[in-house]
Image (tube, helix red, strand yellow):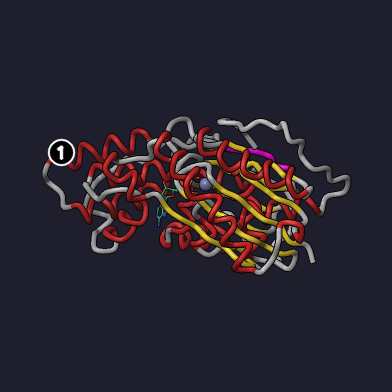
């Protein structure tokens, strides 16, 4: 049975996980840095890199102990090599290189976005290529047709903010703290989405791209007007964002071929209202809908280990060289 160690350190979660070829997460540990970054209202790269450096080695030791395995039992060590905050990415990648060198186990340098893109296949064994993917996180907002491992056709991206970033900025405006997505979702439940008139940027445009900067500015103006309650602003923002996503996705789906499933991944995929709206889009078009459980949507190491397993299964698989670079930018 294939067994792969995954390492994730590209943003503010330090994570290690062991995943096997039967999609079992054999062991996993994750440490969030929310407390360290909260006073600054966002992730501070230097603080993140230092926290990863302190936590990662004992965490890897911990997951190996949890599973009762040794490095030599592994078929590969998969680590995020980008895109992300470069200090953190380097901590994870260099750790993986050192372990690979010491043990002789193959190294796999994983694109973090590929981790998100393939994570639905870890959760759903029936998910086959090609599928339509909405990838929505704090740093990324894309629509892709996933044709296979390493085969991604990008149909849409954002011209300014990512969707998760829009949630985080809305939370900041409303004084809900950091990270903002879950807090906005929580208070939106007590609000009325019809109360605050907000724009739907790009809706109606023939190209499926996103834009959320104007929506964020409108949220700021609504808040500063003093006319609205925070839950109503949160609910109205969330609905406006969902309307944008549904419209953009509908345009992109018309440009895809042979796709039978609609999939959402990335941190914002943890949002129940977003998931519900996407399920309705899928229903309408006769597509199956699937989304990983919320814990696999936000950053984690199981999805990185799984991407490693997918790569191992490719014909002509070759390990990555020990001099491979960490990449702050790395489009899929
Ligand atoms: O995938 P992820 O953990 O990290 C990145 O690769 O960016 O995504 C984090 C993003 C943050 O912007 C966070 O606010 C958002 O996902 N998020 C949510 C929810 N949970 C996390 N946004 C809306 N509703 C949620 N429940
Ligand atoms: Zn991510």
Query: Image check: 118 left or right of 267?
Result: right
Magenta span main SS: strand
Q: Residue at x 59, y 58 (%)?
A: 61
Q: Residue at x 62, y 49 (%)?
A: 115
Quadrant the C terminus occupies: top right
Residue at numbered disc 1:
224
The answer to whether one can see residue 238 in this image is yes
Number of residue marks: 1
**Mark 1 residue CB less than 8 A from any atom of ligand 1:** no
- Give the extent of the magenta segment: 150-156
Instruction: Give the residue at the far right of this rendering.
Output: 316
The answer to whether one can see residue 264 in this image is no
Q: Quadrant of residue 282?
A: bottom right
Q: Position of residue 295 (x, y in %)?
A: 50, 62
Q: Nearer the viewer, residue 183 or 189?
A: 183
Instruction: Give the residue at the far left of this rendering.
Output: 226
Q: Position of residue 29 (x, y in %)?
A: 53, 60
Q: Position of residue 139 (x, y in %)?
A: 48, 39
Q: Nearer the viewer, residue 82 or 77?
A: 77
Q: Quadrant of residue 59?
A: bottom right
Quadrant the N terminus occupies: bottom right
Q: Residue at x 52, y 62 (%)?
A: 279
Q: Nearer the viewer, residue 29 or 57?
A: 57
């Amino acid at each position: 049975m294939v067994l792969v160690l995954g390492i994730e350190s590209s943003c503010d979660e330090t994570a290690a996980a062991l995943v096997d070829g039967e999609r079992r997460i054999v062991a996993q540990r994750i440490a969030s840095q929310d407390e360290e970054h909260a006073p600054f209202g966002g992730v501070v790269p230097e603080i993140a890199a230092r926290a990863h450096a302190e936590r990662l080695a004992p965490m890897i030791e911990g997951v190996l102990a949890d599973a009762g395995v040794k490095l030599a039992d592994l078929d590969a060590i998969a680590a995020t090599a980008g895109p992300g905050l470069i200090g953190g990415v380097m901590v994870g990648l260099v750790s993986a290189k050192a372990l690979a060198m010491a043990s002789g186990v193959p190294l796999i340098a994983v694109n973090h976005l590929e981790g998100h893109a393939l994570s639905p296949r870890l959760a759903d064994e029936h998910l086959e290529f090609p599928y339509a993917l909405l990838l929505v996180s704090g740093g990324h907002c894309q629509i892709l047709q996933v044709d296979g491992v390493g085969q991604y056709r990008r149909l849409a991206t954002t011209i300014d903010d990512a969707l998760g970033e829009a949630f985080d900025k809305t939370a900041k405006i409303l004084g809900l703290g950091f990270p903002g997505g879950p807090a906005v979702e929580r208070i939106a439940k007590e609000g009325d989405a019809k109360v605050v008139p907000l724009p739907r940027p790009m809706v109606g445009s023939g190209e499926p791209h996103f834009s959320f900067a104007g929506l964020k500015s409108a949220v700021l103006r609504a808040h500063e007007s003093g006319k609205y309650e925070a839950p109503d602003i949160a609910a109205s923002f969330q609905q406006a964002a969902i309307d944008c996503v549904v419209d953009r996705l509908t345009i992109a789906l018309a440009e895809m071929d042979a796709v039978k499933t609609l999939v959402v991944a990335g941190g914002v995929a943890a949002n129940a209202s977003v998931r519900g709206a996407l399920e309705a889009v899928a229903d309408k078009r006769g597509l199956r809908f699937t989304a990983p459980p919320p814990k696999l949507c936000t950053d984690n190491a199981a999805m990185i280990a799984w991407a490693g397993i997918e790569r191992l299964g490719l014909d002509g698989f070759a390990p990555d060289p020990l001099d491979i670079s960490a990449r702050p930018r790395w489009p899929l």
